[in-house]
Image (cartoon, coloured by chain):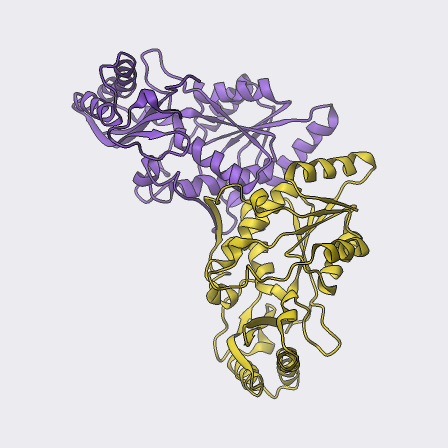
Chain colours: A yellow, B purple
Amino acid sequence: MKAVRTIAELRDSIEELKSSSNKRTVGLVPTMGYLHQGHASLIRAAKDQSDIVVVSIFVNPIQFGPGEDFETYPRDEERDLDAAEGAGADLVFLPSVETMYPKPTKTKITVADVTSGLCGASRPGHFDGVTTVVSKLFNIVQPDYAFFGMKDAQQVAVIEQMVSDLNFNVKIMPCPIIREEDGLALSSRNVYLSPEERTQALVLSRSLRDAEEALEKDQIRTAAEARDLLVSTIQKSQLAVIDYVEVAAFPDLSPLDDDALISELDEPVLLALAVKFGKTRLIDNRLLHPKGE
Amino acid sequence: MKAVRTIAELRDSIEELKSSSNKRTVGLVPTMGYLHQGHASLIRAAKDQSDIVVVSIFVNPIQFGPGEDFETYPRDEERDLDAAEGAGADLVFLPSVETMYPKPTKTKITVADVTSGLCGASRPGHFDGVTTVVSKLFNIVQPDYAFFGMKDAQQVAVIEQMVSDLNFNVKIMPCPIIREEDGLALSSRNVYLSPEERTQALVLSRSLRDAEEALEKDQIRTAAEARDLLVSTIQKSQLAVIDYVEVAAFPDLSPLDDDALISELDEPVLLALAVKFGKTRLIDNRLLHPKGE
């Protein structure tokens, strides 16, 4: 495995790997580093699917809003390089902010509609930052496949929309959420949690599982009932402050009518949460397939 | 030469040309068709520079504003195919609106600052439409070089900014304005002009040439004097209605201070005009290099 920091070096290294053997397809795993088993699962999926695996590690300033945690976002380069190598990466791209933004970008990519609810509503400008940096990475790496975790389900939906609208020649590969044994979805931000917050944060995955079960057992049927159940479950946790609880069609993320019967919908339905514990904002979700996968 | 209408067919054809011989580099000439000698010069430049020349012909609806001439923009596919072949094109891509926009695009690319004056000010949203379609074409064709005429100098500046900000792996090749013998800059829209308008439209190129001469002879020195001379020259033409007359730094297109001494500026200076004759809006410009090329 090779670690590179400049765009020219990365392009040369990919070219070299391609020509040195019969390796043809490139899989990209874009990350903000502080890699955990969720990232490792993306890298392994990339390894299964593609000849050359590129992992990018870049805490992208333009997707953080004022007052968000850009400065304090956890970073550990050495551990990340070990984790990436262990999971099968061929190249790790660790650009500086100056490499990615030698001057402040004047160009932004904006996706309408899909970004208007959920994290897009709570974090104005966040997805412009995501689509802009992801398109830069796509142009730098020119991957055949790009791997994203479904924990950021809206991010997957937004990037799929961008790729389709702009004809990027890359296939987006959404990968399942990886959880701790007790259900907490893996996140680099979990390290912010105090022991008490860590315990109470289990309410996210539990509320989602409970809502899915209640839907399966027909104890609840409508979008409003699902939302209400999620909210009332989360509110039992004293430290939880709800940012949003949404029930939306996937992948267009249009909100469902209150009385929409979930089991009768043709498209997948996303139950999505963002909840704060102290200063730490966590997200989780569950994608339901009422009509089967 | 081969004409193709779908994205898959185009990608396959490029792949085929690349693998059938040692042809490696691809040059793209994006056009809206109704090809004239200006376009032909771009295609010839592409032929000189690259192994495979792709010409796209697409009247892009999203770069036209309400009340602009999208519906009536001149089209002549048969003549265009002959012209493209004559100039050396290998592939001509003629997508339908449905091919380029199977659904209305939710994704837009916006470039700030460079788009705020000149045509960007007169045509709100125009450059979002241009950058969005050009990035689609870049992603479809994945060219090494892309050729644009300097008649749309602001378009060149906007696309250079986008390419730099988004790390597109393509080199933008600006090509000189091609003119009729009497000085009129070639434009597909020239066919709209009545004989009287056609005669009076010469005031565009003449005013630019006169301003450059007056600057060279030190008869005028400042940006305000250059602008005033351009305006007064154009106003001598009875049918001319000025849209804008601008003197700006190139390529960032920041307006110059009124008392800026043009001969002492380090960066190139763009004299740029948009003038209406009846319903026809024409543009022209001249790029000055006060400190040499």
Whether residue B6 is visible, yes or no, is no
Quadrant including the C terminus of chain B: top left
Residue in front for this viewpoint, B6 or A288: A288
**Is A236 placed above or below B285 here?**
below
Q: Is residue A147 left or right of residue B139?
A: right
Give the residue furthest to the right. A21
**Is B181 placed above or below B159 here?**
above
Q: Is residue A134 left or right of residue A186?
A: left
Residue lying at 60% horizontally and 55% vertically, measured from the top left: A59
Quadrant including the N terminus of chain B: top right
Whether residue B212 is visible, yes or no, is yes
Quadrant of residue B33 within the rendered picture: top left
Residue in front for this viewpoint, B283 or B84: B283
Quadrant of residue B75 within the rendered picture: top left
Q: Position of residue B17 (x, y in %)?
A: 69, 27
Residue lying at 44% horizontally and 31% vertically, measured from the top left: B156
**Is A190 placed above or below A22 here?**
below
Q: Is residue A206 left or right of residue B259?
A: right
Residue in front for this viewpoint, A85 or B39: A85
Q: Position of residue B108 (x, y in %)?
A: 47, 48
